[in-house]
Image (tube, rainbow, N blue to C red):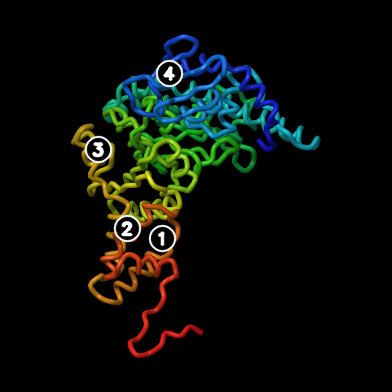
Amino acid sequence: MAGRIPQQFIDDLVSRVDIVELIDSRVPLKKAGREYHACCPFHSEKTPSFTVSPSKQFYHCFGCGAHGTALGFLMEYEHLEFVEAVEELAKMQGLEVPREGGRNDAPRQRQELDGSKQLYHLLSRAEQFYRHQLRHHPQADRAIDYLKGRGLSGEIARDFGIGFAPPGWDNLFTALGRQNEQELIRAGLVVEKEGGKRYDRFRDRIMFPIRDRRGRIIGFGGRVLGDEKPKYLNSPETPVFHKGRELYGLYEARQALRELPRLLVVEGYMDVVALAQFGVRYGVATLGTSVTPEHLELLFRQTDEVVFCFDGDRAGRDAAWRGLENALPMMRDGRTLRFMFMPEGEDPDTLIRQVGQEGFEQLIERAQTLDEFLVEHFKQRADFKRIDGQARLVELSRPLIAKLPQGIYRHKLVERLAPLANMQPDVLQGMLSGTAQPAAVPGRPNVSR
């Protein structure tokens, strides 16, 4: 929703919150004199150095230096953006977040807020409906047999909210009330055809609810049980669902793990769920789109290590390359991006059933680093043993290196490429940045015009 949050509201909100209660609900605190102590949730330690002061309404870690108010803690611990953290704190206090703007903006802002709340409500009711159908619909046996055949337990199905959209044209439409038909269409749950005919978008499919970072249902993915096409069907773009900004399974990963060692980006819902079934609880999936810059910003806000896990065919490698290009501007020092390609005929779902959690995580550890994938990509396009191939390497590298932030990572990547171009690193760096000067010819003055 448009409009700036008034600073006075933010200040009042922070002063209302009991920081001890907020943090203790997430990190158990022990009273020590006038303050409370715990092991810091932001770095590994055995001796508590994390202190919360009820009088100052402030936290501080003497080990890693983390400090701030209740708002800062929520942003850091829950990986929320500023506005999201303000909204979450306000929700805890039963307050509504006001927005500054012209008088003419207020009605529109109110309408947008009310409209979004209605969509979230309907999507939540839809999730409850689909989960109920999985347990009670006479034709749900096929869906249950499929899930059991893929090795999924009831606990994992519960954690991911998996459900069933029964056959028929208007089961959900009828259950959620025809009086909500326009909102159901806006939520992407009901389709309106020419002539005014309306019917359920998802029919005879296993349903995977898609949650945002706050756990709200924003859309669904449905897998067909028969041979119909498409095999997977996603919710369309709606006011609350934007495919290029959301990742399936991220909320569930954060619920399962306090600290995410990495995030593994896979291609499908079942890959995420099957990985979780075998103990790999940090898988996420894009929603029928390539990895976008927005996805990568979201990923790197959660963890410093991201692994792309795609098919080893041409399409999978092309998708990985697009992800690499989008990731380069974000590869500041301390971040890691790696590439894991599936053997022919395998996907994460099938492979982890063969090798188990330990074997699968060993394969992740051996995944290609960014520079290894980059060099492999260049080798397919240039013969480094030839002078023209070395020159082509420089030209291929130039736009990619330019995207990297200045720092050790960029310097090391240039060092990695320099021997392939048969150059010294400083010379290659100069050529890539456009600062290299042509070498002087013996016996002839090097005159610049």
Mark 3 highlights which residue? 350
Q: Secondary structure at mark 3?
A: helix
Residue 364, position as x, y percentages in the image: 26, 41
Residue 63 drawn at (x, y percent):
39, 27
Residue 173 quadrant = top right
Q: CA distance from mark 1 to mark 2?
A: 10 Å
Q: CA distance from mark 1 to mark 3?
A: 34 Å
Q: Nearer the viewer, mark 1 or mark 4?
A: 4
Q: Is residue 82 visible?
A: yes
Quarter of the figure with residue 250: top left
* Number of numbered labels in the structure image: 4
Camera-near label (4 vs 3) is: 4
Which amino acid type is shown beneath numbered disc 4? Val
Q: Identify the disc placed on residue 316.
A: none
The mark closer to the camera, 1 or 3, is 1
Label whose residue precedes the other's in the sequence (2 or 4): 4
Three-letter amino acid code at the position of disc 2: Leu
Residue named by callout 2: 374
- Type of amino acid under label 3: Thr
Give whichever of 253, 271 is nearer the camera. 253
* Dot in front, 2 or 3: 2
Q: Which residue is mark 1?
A: 400
Q: Earlier in the sequence, mark 1 or mark 4?
A: 4
Residue 27: image tag: 4
